[in-house]
Image (cartoon, helix red, strand yellow):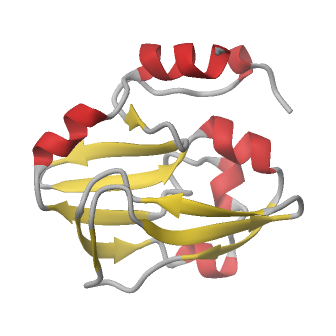
Amino acid sequence: MKALDELNFPEDVKYTKDHEWAKLDGDTVTIGLSDYAQDQLGEIVFVELPEEGDSFSEGDEFGSVESVKAVSEIYLPIGGEITEINEDLEDAPELVNNDCYAGGWLVKVKPDDLGELDNLMDKAAYLEMLKG
């Protein structure tokens, strides 16, 4: 596992206590696992995602990731409808390990309430949480 200063934490995304990230792009929010989460999980071998059109509330479990170490649930940081899933992960789940912010994103959501993004942490607050 890497030290925190070796991991990538972009400034333009928000983070959850469960180590997901959310990035607003127009009227859509892209969701993924943080670099910290994928590093802790180790080699990801399977990703289970919902169907396009499924709707969830903020904090709902919407899928899971399986690594050589464990299976972990993933939670939606903002409520809304799934508008797109990263289908590349079906054949290449390791994309989450390779670049969790670009090629390894999980889902895109049309949010019910953009104000829910205010409940998430910025980079500084997330790093403080990780340092404990």
Q: Residue at x 51, y 77 (%)?
A: 49
The quarter of the picture where the N terminus appears is: top right
Image height check: is 75 above or below 117?
below
Q: Residue at x 46, y 58 (%)?
A: 75
When asked about the image quadrant of residue 14, the answer is top left
When asked about the image quadrant of residue 54, the answer is bottom left
Closer to the camera, 55 or 8? Answer: 55
How many numbered badges does the structure rendering display? Answer: 0
Closer to the camera, 94 or 16? Answer: 16
Q: Is residue 125 left or right of residue 63?
A: left
Image height check: is 33 above or below 122?
below
Q: Position of residue 73 (x, y in %)?
A: 60, 64
Q: Residue at x 33, y 74 (%)?
A: 84
Q: Is residue 37 left or right of residue 24?
A: right
When asked about the image quadrant of residue 80, the answer is bottom left
The quarter of the picture where the C terminus appears is: top right
Q: Position of residue 117 (x, y in %)?
A: 23, 40
Q: Position of residue 97 (x, y in %)?
A: 71, 51
Q: Position of residue 89 (x, y in %)?
A: 60, 73
Q: Residue at x 82, y 27 (%)?
A: 2
